[in-house]
Amino acid sequence: LKPWEDPNAKPFLQIRNVTKKFGAFTAVNDVSLDIYQGELFCLLGGSGCGKSTLLRMLAGFEMPTSGQILIDGEDMSGVPPHKRDTNMMFQSYALFPHMSVEKNIAYGLKRDGVPRAEIATRVTEMLSLVQLDGLAARKPHQLSGGQRQRVALARSLIKRPKLLMLDEPLGALDKKLREETQRELIKIQETLGVTFVVVTHDQEEAMTLSSRLGVMTAGQIVQIGTPHDVYEYPNTRFVADFIGSVNIFEGKIAEDADDHVVIRSGDTASDILVSHGISGVKGQSVAVALRPEKIAIERTLPESLPNRLAATVDDVSYMGNLSVFHVTLPTGKQVKVSQTNRRRSEDDAIRAGEAVQIGWDGAASVVVTA
Ligand code: ATP
């Protein structure tokens, strides 16, 4: 049982109805969220959605206009950043340019008057944890971007905070290095068991890193869940669209049975069978969200498939690992389909201009709010 599934588990971080206003503008709007010890929780959202403001309130750099933040059961109202058992790592890293790697990492301990021998031991431990052994004497300008990122991480962890906030921690790295560093970050977090709250606008990054994530828009968290749940069962059209790629069919509920719903959609001109998602009243306007990779595309599909439509292929993009098809239904609706390329041969590949069928089973799509 994961802590968030356990009704008896005590949250480590409790955000209760937190609102932050800047003048008349509401940057964070009545957010409530529980985060558990040892989680790597991502706040995911586009520019200006309020995720950094929420993070800064957790660290104590901003105070909520209303609502409460509790860390380990303790109310943080009026508690300044340095009196909290937390730390924050900024995207800019903010390393001291004139100090060596070792001195940068040791800085917080030295300022606290920790004995030299202990500082040396802890810095050595930390250097090995972030795989920077041997680089202790270098200055920041003698390091690569990835190495600077690791110095910043080591520095923010040296005082063993219980909670570390990371604002776009991998934003300055190129794609390949970013992916490597994501795995390292997870390993380090798991080794230390420190709770991480990460802010990112990158949905792939949030999917890779998170134990759970919260999707934010316009100052509110619209869905909280594991990467799997948020991807497979988005609760709104916004979330379905924000995370990954999705086809949306507009429609109305035509039938709502115990184990399935039928959606009548002008986009498909035939009913769509969905075997889970919502219950709602007949006639209610909804949308069906269907991921491109859950759609089969063939010249002829088996009749047993409950959702099966004729389509014409507009274009095919070969991307190595997968092929992406844009097809048009007789209604004029465009649909995106993607398939992994299992075979090497192109002999029987589907090409632009062909008449095909697309289809999916009832469990492939979900109903979301319109
Ligand atoms: P980004 O990824 O672009 O940083 P964000 O989701 O982190 O976006 P925030 O930095 O939390 O966004 O800002 C949310 C909103 O609050 C923005 O519209 C921003 O202009 C506004 N805002 C943030 N700080 C202040 C401030 N000190 N005074 C006035 N408005 C602010």
Image: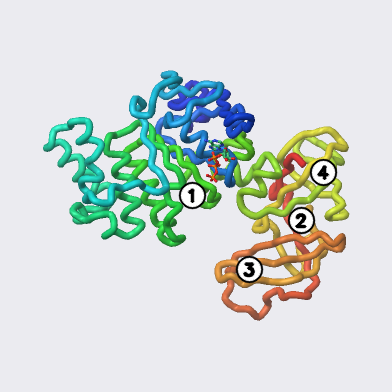
Task: Look at 67% across and 49% down and name the residue there.
Answer: 241
Question: Helix or strand or loop: what does disc 1 sit on?
Answer: helix
Q: Disc 3 to disc 4, how far (Cα)? A: 30 Å
Distance, label 1 to label 2, CA atoms, is 32 Å
Question: Dot 3 corresponds to which residue?
Answer: 323
On screen, residue 85 versus residue 251, left or right, reads left
Q: Which type of secondary structure does the marked residue at label 2 adopt? A: loop
CA separation, marks 4 and 1?
A: 34 Å
Which percent across, then down, holds residue 190? 36, 41
Q: Say whether disc 3 or disc 4 marks the residue closer to the N-terminus.
A: 4
Residue at point 74% right, 39% down?
369
- Relative horizontal placement of residue 10, taking residue 330 as reference (left or right): left
Going by the numbered disc 3, the residue's amino acid type is: Ser
Contact flag, marks 2 and 4 (Cβ < 8 Å): no
Q: Within 10 angstroms of label 2, few (less than 14), some, or many (20 or more) residues?
A: few
Location of residue 306 with respect to 34 vertically, above or below: below
Q: How many marks?
A: 4
Q: Say which element carries label 4.
A: strand
At 69% from the left and 62% from the top, the residue drawn is 337
Tell me which numbered mark, 2 or 3, is placed earlier along the sequence: 2
Identity, as a three-letter code, of the amino acid under mark 2:
Leu
Q: Which residue in the structure is indicated by mark 1? A: 208
Residue at the extreme front of the image, as rendered? 23
**Disc 3: CA contacts within 10 A as few (<14), some (14-19) or many (>=20):** some
For this rendering, which residue is in front, 262 or 190?
Answer: 190
Marks 2/4: CA–CA distance = 15 Å
Q: Disc 1 marks which amino acid?
A: Thr
Q: Position of residue 245 (x, y in %)?
A: 65, 55
Residue that label 4 marks: 262
Q: Earlier in the sequence, mark 2 or mark 4?
A: 4
Q: Which quadrant does ligand 1 occupy?
A: top right
Q: Are marks 3 and 4 in contact (CB under 8 Å)?
A: no
